[in-house]
Image (tube, rainbow, N blue to C red):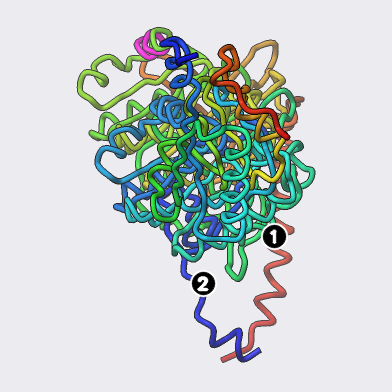
């Protein structure tokens, strides 16, 4: 036991790959080999190249050993990620060991052999560029080049040993046939490397979901479980570290205006600076209006606002806003508003998260509105959706941005949506917009259901929509059952009786507590 | 009968240019070199040039030729380019790989003597 305490911890190498270092708790174990195993199309080669690219950007040269694609193909394919391998080669920061099969050369095996030449070439390449990182892509392709599998096995072990002896940190890729089957095809790959990471590209409900899992880190700590990731042009692998988004964001007591004075009052003086508000309601209850007010209020205070619209086009939004008396086009001209409209289906939820994060980082808004979350709900699985909301929420909170998301309820009257049940705990405030049917007329009601860290108005208030936006009216005092979707008119006498009963109960309960208080 | 110009040319063309890539002075290296010398002596009758490259001393040569395995024998001439990997202990395969053709026997003077 004493030994384990006194042994120095395994040193780690910061990979520079977005968020991978977080789940790997500081990077890949230094001077060790890490196996990256995944099915076809799971992003192994991208990962292997990115490992080197991130190193080169940090001033650490690398060697890419390719057994599968030719060096020319790798250079070509990686250009779309913004990695100019050819330029790095010219600058002496990267070199290839091209061990891809050449279809033009006929090879005959006549007697025993080993891969001594390959090892010599890797050693030569590492020495040439003074590499600290080596990527080998992929081990499985070595097996297909030679008939003697036992020899290949032995030689792969020798290569792993040689890599360690050279003092480089290496990433070896391997294929697997099934996202949840054996670690790798030939059953030996995982024993060659010290560490194992798995890339998955599973098909769930007709959508692809990429995840990365650290399976084994010999002697080192790491985050457990699968983490979603995405592969984007001009960036490569981006891991979305959900557990790393721990609840460590600062909490602000600064209140900002929702863009509507009466709504601010209902919220106890406005929304908190780094809070996320969910606005829920059926179609036409005024969700987009609430969002427009929120943006207008921000721009009026000179804050930059971002609107992510998944349901309406920019022109529709501008027209609607004009109807309420908000000049979105002027806000845009003043550089205070950016409207991003797109169909939710154009990319997966992980990609949306990364895209939105990039837009936010680029524009630097103080307010972000998303209309509506429900439109994104169907793009991926429920799990992916929840991860998206967690990711976005924590991202904007870290940046101390005020967020407002809308969610559409399925039924016109009352009811809740899947969106709400999955994300309501993630948001700080919830504003419900509901239709209230009274004496053959549809009225609109609004209530602040939840306001984390603040007192708020508990009443359900009537509001009308007109020029200037939302005009708050009186509370629905003589109606019950609005939220269940079955409003019932109650005579004022009954209301009075119930309330007096309630007040009496509270009074009765309060008295004994006061009596129990020790006399001082 | 004297050599005709045509057989001179044929003789040049059928000269084998061979390169053997090995790793250091391992036992396998020695076996491969011995095997190759024996096969060439028996089958090529001096019509060959052999270069031995140690990849530990000259890894760039291995890189340029994209060699993975050692020993690797490359036949550059006559075409086509051929590779044989292994310690060359399987003579049949070596001959198959190198596409060794019998020496030109159109002219009696260049015909190989019968084995006796």
The local secondary structure at tag 1 comes to helix
Badge number at residue A302: none
Query: What are the residue bounds of the magenta stretch?
Result: A317-322
How many numbered circles are shown?
Answer: 2
Along the viewing direction, whichever of A300 and A56 lies nearer the viewer: A56
- Residue at image location 48% in from the left, 26% down from the top: B15
The local secondary structure at tag 2 comes to loop
A321 falls in the magenta region: yes
Mark 1 or mark 2: name the one nearer the start of the chain.
Answer: 2
- Residue at image location 41% in from the left, 35% down from the top: A235
**Is residue A253 positioned above or below A265 on the image?**
below
Is the Cβ of the residue at disc 1 closer than 8 Å to that at disc 2? no
Considering the whole magenta stretch, tell me its main secondary structure: helix
Chain identifier of the residue bearing label 2 in the image: A
A161 horizontally vs A418: left or right = left
Tell me residue A487's x, y (percent).
73, 25
Give the CA separation, mark 1 to mark 2: 61 Å
Q: Name the outermost residue toward the front.
A: B1
Q: Name the outermost residue toward the right.
A: A181
Along the viewing direction, whichever of A512 and A221 lies nearer the viewer: A221
- Residue A260 lies in quadrant: top left
Tell me residue B13's x, y (percent).
46, 19
Is the residue marked by circle 1 packed among few (<14), some (14-19), or many (20+) residues within 10 Å?
A: few
Q: Which residue is mark 2?
A: A10
Q: Which residue is mark 1?
A: A506
**Is residue A314 positioned above or below A476 on the image?**
above
Is the residue marked by circle 2 packed among few (<14), some (14-19), or many (20+) residues within 10 Å?
A: some
Tell me residue A370's x, y (percent).
48, 28
A78 falls in the magenta region: no
Residue A334 seen in this snapshot: yes
């Amino acid at each position: 036991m004493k030994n384990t305490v006194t042994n120095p911890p395994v040193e780690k190498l910061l990979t520079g790959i977005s968020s991978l270092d977080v789940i790997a708790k500081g990077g890949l174990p230094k001077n060790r080999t890490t196996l990256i195993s995944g099915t076809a199309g799971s992003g192994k080669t991208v990962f292997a190249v990115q490992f080197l690219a991130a190193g080169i950007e940090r001033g650490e040269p690398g060697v890419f050993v390719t057994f599968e694609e030719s060096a020319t193909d790798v250079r070509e394919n990686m250009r779309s990620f913004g990695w100019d391998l050819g330029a790095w080669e010219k600058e002496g920061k990267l070199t290839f060991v091209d061990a891809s099969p050449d279809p033009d050369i006929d090879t005959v095996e006549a007697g025993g052999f080993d891969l001594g030449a390959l090892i010599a070439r890797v050693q030569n390449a590492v020495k040439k560029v003074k590499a600290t990182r080596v990527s080998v892509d992929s081990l499985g392709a070595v097996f297909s080049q030679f008939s003697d599998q036992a020899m290949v096995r032995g030689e792969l072990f020798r290569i792993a040993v040689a890599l360690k002896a050279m003092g480089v940190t290496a990433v070896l890729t391997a294929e697997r046939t099934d996202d949840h089957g054996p670690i790798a095809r030939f059953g030996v790959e995982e024993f060659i490397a010290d560490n194992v990471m798995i890339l998955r590209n599973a098909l769930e409900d007709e959508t692809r979901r990429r995840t990365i899992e650290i399976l084994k880190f010999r002697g080192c700590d790491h985050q457990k479980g699968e983490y979603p990731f995405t592969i984007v042009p001009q960036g490569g692998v981006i891991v979305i570290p959900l557990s790393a988004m721990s609840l460590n964001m600062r909490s602000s007591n600064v209140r900002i205006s929702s863009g509507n004075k009466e709504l601010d009052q209902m919220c106890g003086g406005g929304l908190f600076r780094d809070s996320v508000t969910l606005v829920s309601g059926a179609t036409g209850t005024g969700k987009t209006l609430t969002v427009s007010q929120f943006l207008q209020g921000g721009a009026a205070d000179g804050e930059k606002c971002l609107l992510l619209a998944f349901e309406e086009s920019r022109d529709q939004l501008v027209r609607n806003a004009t109807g309420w008396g908000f000049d979105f086009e002027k806000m845009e001209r003043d550089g205070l508003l950016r409207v991003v409209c797109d169909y939710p289906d154009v990319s997966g939820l992980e990609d949306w998260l990364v895209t939105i994060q990039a837009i936010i980082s680029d524009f630097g808004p103080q307010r972000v509105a998303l209309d509506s979350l429900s439109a994104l709900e169907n793009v991926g699985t429920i799990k992916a959706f929840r991860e998206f909301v967690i990711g976005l929420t924590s991202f904007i909170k870290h940046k101390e941005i005020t967020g407002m998301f809308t969610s559409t309820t399925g039924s016109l009257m009352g009811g809740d949506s899947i969106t709400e049940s999955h994300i309501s705990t993630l948001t700080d405030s919830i504003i419900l917009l509901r239709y209230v049917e009274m004496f053959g007329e549809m009225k609109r009601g609004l209530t602040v259901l939840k306001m984390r860290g603040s007192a708020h108005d508990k009443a359900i208030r009537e509001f009308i929509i007109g020029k200037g936006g939302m005009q708050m009216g009186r509370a629905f005092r003589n109606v019950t059952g609005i939220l269940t979707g079955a409003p019932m008119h109650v005579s004022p006498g009954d209301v009075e009786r119930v309330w007096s009963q309630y007040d009496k109960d509270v009074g009765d309960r309060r008295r004994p507590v006061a009596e129990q208080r020790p006399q001082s | 009968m004297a050599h005709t110009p045509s057989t001179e040319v044929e003789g040049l063309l059928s000269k084998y240019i061979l390169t053997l890539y090995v790793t250091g002075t391992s036992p396998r290296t020695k076996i491969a070199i011995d095997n190759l010398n024996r096969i060439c002596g028996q089958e090529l009758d001096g019509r060959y040039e052999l270069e031995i490259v140690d990849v530990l001393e000259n890894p760039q040569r291995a890189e340029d030729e994209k060699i993975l395995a050692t020993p690797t024998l490359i036949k550059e001439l006559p075409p086509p380019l051929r590779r044989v990997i292994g310690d060359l202990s399987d003579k049949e395969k070596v001959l198959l790989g190198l596409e060794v053709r019998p020496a030109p026997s159109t002219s009696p003077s260049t015909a190989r003597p019968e084995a006796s």
